[in-house]
Amino acid sequence: MSTTAQSLHEEMFVLNLGPQHPATHGVLRIKLMMDGEYIADAESVIGYGHRMQEKMGENRTYAKFLPNTGRMDYVAAMFNTHGYVCAVEKLAGLRVPERAEYIRVITAELNRVASHLLWLGAFLIDLGGFTPLLYTFDDREQILDLLEGLTGTRLTYCYYRFGGVCNDVDDAFLAGSRQFVARMRARMPMYHALITKNIIFRKRCEEIGPITAEQCRKYGATGPVIRGSGVAYDVRKAEPYGAYPQLDFNVPVYPQGDCLARYMVRLDEIVESLRLVEQALDRLPGGPVMAEKVPRLLKPPKGDCYFNVESARGSFGVRLFSDGTDKAYRLKLRSPCFSNLSLFRECSRGMLLADALALLGSLDLIIPDIDR
Amino acid sequence: MAHELTWQIVRVLLYVVGLIAFAAFNAAYLSLLERKIPAWFQLRYGPKEVGPWGLLQPVADGVKLLTKQLLVQAESDVLLFKLAPVMVVVPAIMCLALIPFSEVLWARNINVGLLALFSFSAIHVLGTMLGGWSSYNKYASIAAARVVAQNIAYEIPLLLVMVTFVMVTHSMNLFDIVQQQAGGFWHWYLLRVQASPLMPVAFVIFFICMLAEANRAPFDMFEAESELVAGAFTEYSGMGFGLFFIAEYANVLVSCSLATVLFLGGWQCPFGLLPGLHWFLIKMYALCFVVIWVRWSFPRTQFYGLLNLSWKFLIPVAFLHLVLTAVMLKLF
């Protein structure tokens, strides 16, 4: 037994939350020091899903690493691919055609909606409500079908390419996306009636797991977590990329910092994403979807670059060093989930186990994205 | 005389066997309904592979549970660990033995039926607590601590409501209580507002407490699977778990039967026609449906939220109901 454990009160005990626990949604282990049902300390033990993605990015060509990006945050694979592709394009000086940028916005925002829907269902399971999951999966299924038709994959998309996207959208996808936007808008009041207005849900989320903006900054938490704490930080606005500067959308911000605020941010983001999809569909320009003259074996000039995209969970960053060869010299991936998880230790102190699990759920963690 | 006594004993034994069969059958088929009904809520089919409409699914589940190994951890308290499931399931069946199902179908009709019923139903709490505690598992220990706190919190408003109820009925005999409600649905205690204007409220309190007593969602604190894995049952496998499972549904059955007997007129017809077992079963299964409906519609409450609900809301209201009823009885 370590000295810290000995110095603690003798009635405290260690509770292993995970690596196989229903609330951790994957192989995350949290070593809880419990004082009765209160948490005295929570140490996250990560790395069960570590696949050396960064090292893999360094020992194979850029194109060969590209499919790996979809396997990190597999719930929102578009964003990882987007970040990596944009970083390589920036390094190699590739210009992406306008049409491809718009298609990227449509697919990425659809993926954001799918990711938030999955979170919504899983969060309600954490709170003990099973039924909403089935409704959110019904809606998510529509997105997966659309994206499957376009990209050939349902989950781990590898649709973006250096210089564009791999194939053009067809009419079925465009019509289907419009249909989905209308359907999802009509479903939102149902979700609010089923979940937001539910008294038990509100009691479990209001003023539970407060996170201050200061704490978010301290640990580098981004995405809906920081926006739920009253900071309007969104990479799409702060460092605009792709077609986002030409599109009109709001950044939902809630100042309370509790689980309900993070929930509301995500639900509002679904609505904003639908707006973005609709605008991008309306303005979709013609032209090619791939840049001309992209060499088959990409050898970006020497240099390094950092590219940030707003993933469904926060800021996903890619830092690439090129030494002029066909492989990256160094690849660093900034996972939003890793930063969001690091909040948990400080914020869960003194909380009840059940409330801490609501907090953990509201952070929207994808464990393979933490481990990479 | 001796002949009469033998007949009584044989009769009770027959009823006990019948009730065990009834409880087991209901546990099996309520568990099927527990999957089929939410399947309708949730845009899916539920079990449909085993037998027509999935009707043999409970049999398959039972066979699976029976063939599984009963694992006992080396560190656990073996005697208590093995005794606990029995301590949970037996009181539930004892409770059923006190319920009058119809005018002619009842196992024992005793004058303190209501009191006996609550005495038996208090035992299953002890069983669950011992099961959790003897498992030598931290999740189960947390669950065991929760069980005790939860049940103390909910026995009080429940018994307060019952005290008030007995003041109105002047009887603890469940058979008599049903007979007092003969006539039509306006004679049911649920709607006897002239006895106490808060009678419907009393029913709601009673029902909430019964949900909490039977440890059904949204009050399934000690089984909270997203927090405590499987709570008090974490270490149980095979039929050890199966008995807890049967007990859960048997408790739902007891709760719904008792609610039917006390508030909904038992076997009496709502319109004063053709009283009989069928009315009892219709009312009881309607309540069972509500229990399942509630479980699949609401998230789980927090533990302290649950205690707050009891101590800060249900107990004061139950007290108010008690005082009000006493005043009403004295005045009119």
Image (cartoon, grey):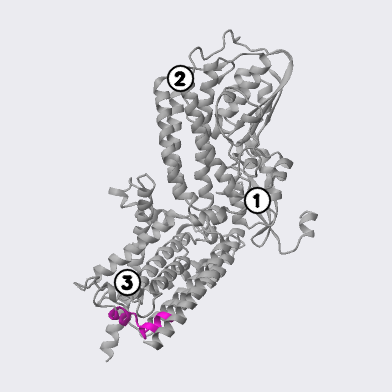
Which sits in the foreground, A130 or B254? A130
Which segment is the magenta one?
B163-180
Q: Which residue is mark 3?
A: B264
Within 10 Å of disc 2 (Cα), the crowding (few <14, some 14-19, many 20+) is some
Q: Is residue B93 visible?
A: yes
Q: Which residue is mark 1?
A: A210
**Pointer 2 chain:** A
Three-letter amino acid code of the residue under disc 1: Pro
Three-letter amino acid code of the residue under disc 3: Leu
**Pointer 1 chain:** A
Residue at x-position 63% and y-position 41%: A227
> Is B307 left, or right, of A372 in this rendering?
left
Question: Between tags 1 and 2, which lies in front?
Answer: 1
Circles 1 and 3 on the same subunit: no
Residue A169: give its label.
2
> Is A370 left, or right, of B326 in this rendering?
right
Q: Is residue A137 above or below residue B240?
A: above
